[in-house]
Image (cartoon, rainbow, N blue to C red):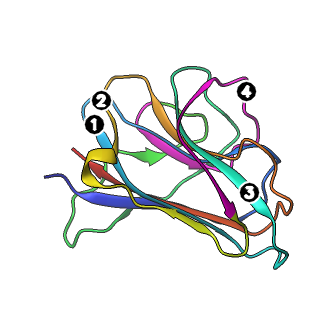
Amino acid sequence: MGSTYSFSANSVTLAGATTIALIRPNTTRSIEILRVELSQSGSATSAQCRVNLCTISSTFPNSMTGATIVPLDDGAATSTISSGTSGSAGTAGVNAGSENGSTKVVLYAAAFNAPIGWAWVPGPDERIVLTASSGNAFAVFFPAAPSSLTGWHCTVVFREL
């Protein structure tokens, strides 16, 4: 079994309907998405937010902030995923500045109350796996701009296979 890692967007301001987190496997290791959490600290006003967990196969969002990959296993090797800003293979980024016309395939759609936050913790048979060299990226995407664009947090936990 591979090592487990996370990366996060911490108190970012969204550009509107946007990708808040994106990870794309490299050419040698597949990745399995284990958990996604969303919350915000910009407003205490009750408001519903929509979120999509999706794949993107070409024309990736860009102008992202490169993500720091953090090992969650004691003594884990360095991840094969590195910080990236444009959806290149083997990279992760947060808070896209532009969707760049990317086409998304929605795997899971949900809505949640912004002050409460949201967590997606799939069962073993529901986990999303992106195979090495597939060209696909996994994205956490807001299909509509939330009522408050400030103070958003997103954490993605993944395992390298």
Mark 3 or mark 2: name the one nearer the start of the chain. 3
- Label 4: few (<14), some (14–19) or many (≥20) C-alpha neighbours in 10 Å: few
Determine which residue is flagged by label 1.
30
Q: Secondary structure at mark 1?
A: loop
Confirm or deny contact between disc 4 and disc 1 (CB under 8 A).
Answer: no
- Which amino acid does the dot numbered 4 rest on? Asn
Confirm or deny contact between disc 1 and disc 2 (CB under 8 A).
Answer: yes
Nearer the observer: mark 3 or 2; the answer is 3
Mark 3 or mark 4: name the one nearer the start of the chain. 3
**Residue 100: which numbered mark, if any?**
4
The magenta region covers: 89-112
Determine which residue is flagged by label 3.
49
Q: Is residue 24 above or below residue 8?
A: above
Confirm or deny contact between disc 4 and disc 2 (CB under 8 A).
Answer: no
- Label 3: few (<14), some (14–19) or many (≥20) C-alpha neighbours in 10 Å: many
Which residue sits at x=56%, y=47%? Answer: 93
Measuring from the top left, give residue 9's x and y in whole percent.
Answer: 61, 61
Q: CA distance from mark 3 to mark 2?
A: 32 Å
Q: Is residue 33 above or below residue 8?
A: above
Confirm or deny contact between disc 3 and disc 4 (CB under 8 A).
Answer: no
Q: CA distance from mark 4 to mark 1?
A: 25 Å
Q: Quadrant of residue 111?
A: bottom right
Mark 4 or mark 2: name the one nearer the start of the chain. 4
- Label 1: few (<14), some (14–19) or many (≥20) C-alpha neighbours in 10 Å: many
- Which amino acid does the dot numbered 2 rest on? Ala
